[in-house]
Image: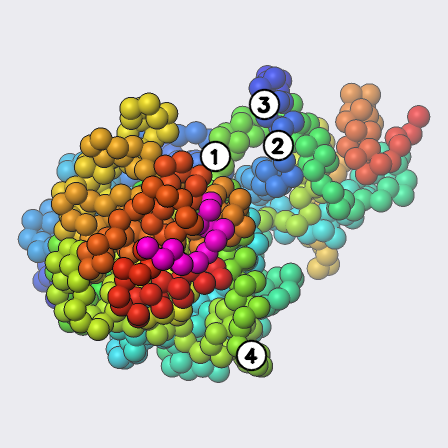
Amino acid sequence: MMITVELRERLSALGSSELERLMQVVVKEYVERNPDAAAYFSPEILTAGLGQAAADAGLAAVPVVEPDDKTEVLRAIALELAEEPRYATLLGNALAVDRPTRVDPVTASIVLAGIVLVLQTRFEVSYDHHNGKRKLHIAISKAPTSENLIAKLFGLFKVTPPS
Amino acid sequence: LTSTTPFRLFILGDLPPAGGDVELISLAEYRHARVLSRTTLRAADLDWFRQAIRDLRGFIEIGSPVLEPGFLKDLGARLFELVIRSTIRDLFVTATAQRDGFVPFELFVESSALASWPWEYLFDSGTRMFVCRDFHPISRSIFDQTLPLTTGETRKRLRLLVVLGAADDDDEIDVDEEVLLLESVFRSYLEPDRFEMVVKTLSASELTMLLQTSRGRFDIVHFLGHSAFDLSRSEGYLRLMKAGARESTKLYANDFAQAAADSRIRLAFLNACETARSAIAEEPARSSVAAALLGRGIPAVVAHQFSVPDNGAHFFAIAFYNLLSCGRPLIEAMRAGRAAMSHADDNRPFDWGIPVLYTRDPQVVVFPATDRQAAVETSSGGASQSFMVNPASNRTTSKRQGREDRQRQRGAEAATARSWSGDSAFGSTRTERSGDVAPDQPVTSTPVPSSEAPPAPGRPLAVSRASTVAIVDIDARAGFLAATIEAANRAQSYYQFRLAYLPVPRGAVRKQVEDSAAPQLFIPALEDFAATTPQELKSDWVCFITRNLLAGHGFWNHLAATLDTNPAVFFVTTADLRDFARLAGTTFAKATLLVCLSMLVASDERWDLDYHSETAGCLLDYCWNRSDMIVGLKKMRFDHAPCRSKIMDKEMLAAIDAIIALQT
């Protein structure tokens, strides 16, 4: 099932705070299913893991940082996630429940975490704890079908993919 | 302590991490009886429970998966049948049959994994009742720890520390509203000398230090802010922030509990998400914020096992403290709080089970009843029915508007504030912000309404005491009311305003009244209910505030109107007031207060006053066109000679002038 027109329209109309809340919901759901991931959603680990993934994809020196203005980046991530049936359902359900709660956000780096979530729909993402250091691994494979996605995602950091 | 005998249930046995069948033992105690039952939890059933509980958490916290209406009863019934069966069930039925009021249900669970299950949703399919919602309010304790027997000494003056973990401009939590509501609850039901309320914004280290150095200083700690359960650490935490700073820090369960261990706090209320959530593989006293506090000696902890909606959390807290301050036991306050959550606009059917009480004694009375509380309770027909709440909505638009009003008020107050100096040792207090009390001073001091019987409706007030005015917010959701009332009371002493809480019957709002498309509150529909409210609220006047225009027999689209059978009761609407206030260059709060004042003056039978057709910027302008009210709001003076000259009471005139001059 692809993203529905209705869901696309709703995501396209969301404001900044709504998009952030929505992505926090998606990340929380992922962490609940993968408790090991909780410790890896810090800015440093996400930046390092995504930086390595960019390098593996041939995108050297990608400035992987949480952008100041997250709105359009979060929207792009949400739309990308919504292409997956599982996330389309989750996003649709989460949009139906719009009430403020007192839960602490899962991570401050919601854009980086969101990109990891999109990547884990195509690539293997693993979490490694070695010598007191935590690392996030994203096994990037350069299949033609995945290059568009990589280009799109890392393009969010305004990086031009290799020709 | 009350004398009600609790029903105690111990669940013994652990869940195998790798799956497989497991034998569980239930042990129940009631009075002198003790019975035991064994059951085998099959692997397939265990898988079903785990998935169902994951789904429940998902639905409550993120709305996914969507659950069928019968899901909760199904889960609750299977939990019930798992642990309350055969002889245990017989004893439970006996306890229910012999009850005189509620029978507290105390739960002790050996397994960490089982302790993390939502037992509050136990559903008795025999009686078709959720155990917790009906006669057996559930509380939890810690299975394998020896807890102190004392629940702390009862002192005449209770001290409440409110710890703010969110900023004023937090989009998810209306901090100001909850603080104001807490304050008004205590003021309504406790003598001023019976409680202190200190409000602070603290970082993790400041709160830790305060708890460690303030042994016996506070009886209750109330936290409101953000919190969560850190899955990577298997430990819950509170999010705290330094006053005036944007950076925040986490205070984890065990660090918090260790700091509070010798604080002599009698009750901790953690009105934030997942504060009662515990780890599957770690005992609650080492993973849940609430259980960790109980394990370190705090006798009672109120917390939440899932994410809690902000609006529901307001309702829960206010109803909880309402009951508590009336001298009711903890467990009854919990039950009332759970029930009150259903009043929230955005309530969902599972919300009532989110709060959890961890305690070794659910029947402890934190505020012993006084004559005054008893009188209020008696006149209102019982605490559990009367002390309902009506906090303002948390809806973002309302919240933001409310915040703007309050900020405007604060700005005005700051401009006129007397000097206040110095920072308190820890963070900032609410009283510092308002600028009228020295830092770290308690928020108290509302004069106590007279105990004299109120005069006949609308009759002259012959005595020189304050005329008491109870304000009941039906549905206007005027979050600023408490602050406005406080300001009005500070400005004069002729009228003593107070916020009152009453459950108002539904069904009085009607659409398509005559030629009006706007919904109208049809006052005659509330006649029977409203007529006796001055006696019930022990007030000379009762002012109901609604967001709808007002209608009655032969009139509609009114801004204000009295009750036919009791002119001491009147209704005012906030419809259009926000716009009128803006056009007049004043605040919504001020406009609302002036409409109330107008009705107070017009209803005072001593002066033969009545509304006049002329629009003179007077309190008594009839305002045939509702927008004529802008004239009066702009003018902000009561100098219309024909009306003013009729009032012979100089104190009343001074009070009117003082209220009109308020900068709210």
Whether labels 3 and 2 share one chain: yes
Residue range highlighted in magenta: B630-642
Per the model, the C-alpha gap separating discs 1 and 3 is 14 Å
User: Which circle marks residue A97 in the picture?
Assistant: 1
- Foreground pick, B618 / B228: B618
- Amino acid type, residue under disc 2 in the picture: Leu
How many C-alpha atoms fall within 10 Å of the one at disc 3: few (<14), some, or many (≥20)? some
How many C-alpha atoms fall within 10 Å of the one at disc 2: few (<14), some, or many (≥20)? some
The subunit carrying tag 2 is A
For image coordinates 69% across by 47% down, the residue present is: A109
- Amino acid type, residue under disc 3 in the picture: Leu
Q: For residue A154, which quarter of the picture? A: top right
Relative to A3, B579 lies left or right: left
Mark whose residue sits in front, 1 or 2: 2
Residue assigned mark 4 = B419
Per the model, the C-alpha gap separating discs 3 and 4 is 55 Å
Per the model, the C-alpha gap separating discs 1 and 2 is 14 Å
Residue B66 placed where, x, y %? Answer: 43, 29
Residue assigned mark 2 = A14
Q: Say if residue B79 shows up in the picture.
A: no
Whether labels 2 and 4 share one chain: no
- Amino acid type, residue under disc 1 in the picture: Val
User: Which circle marks residue A7 in the picture?
Assistant: 3
